[in-house]
Amino acid sequence: MKRIKLSDEVILISGKDKGKIGKVTKINNDRVFVEGAKMVKKHTKGNPATNSQGGIIEKESSLHISNVMLYNATKKAGDRVGIKKLEDGKKVRFFKSDNEVVDT
């Protein structure tokens, strides 16, 4: 079971966008894309066949998964995540600081 999943709310803990909060939009192995974080400018060439215009577009770049923490809304800070089994055998994620279950 992964500690960070798609559409989780995370906080960045390093880099130029440190402290920014956003949702995970995409995960590739050990890299994550966070909504509105690590924006880069990409120069694109126009293509008349697909009717796309060229220019400079701003898009999100990937971050390593170790540079984000799951955001705990009750503490208003990033929090470490653990995995435990419930009585019925189901695995769930929980915040290590207050043992609150993240997903039900």
Image (spheres, grey):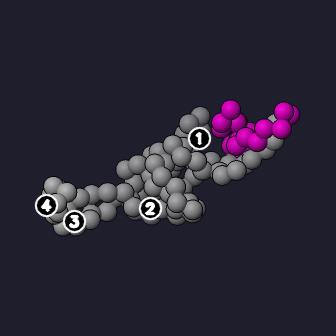
| Residue 72: image tag | 1
Residue ID for mark 4: 48
- CB under 8 Å between discs 3 and 2: no
Quarter of the image with the C terminus is top right
> Can residue 12 be spotted in the picture?
no
Instruction: Say which residue label 2 marks.
Output: 62
**Residue 25 on the magenta span:** no
Crowding at dot 3, Cα within 10 Å, few <14 / some 14-19 / many 20+, comes out as few
Q: Is residue 90 magenta-colored? A: yes
Helix, strand or loop at mark 3: strand
Q: Nearer the viewer, mark 3 or mark 4?
A: 4
Q: Is residue 14 placed above or below 1 in the rendered structure?
A: below
Question: In the rendered image, which residue does mark 3 sit on?
Answer: 44
Q: Residue at x 36, y 57 (%)?
A: 60
State how far apart marks 4 and 2 are (Cα). 29 Å
Q: Main secondary structure of the magenta part?
A: loop
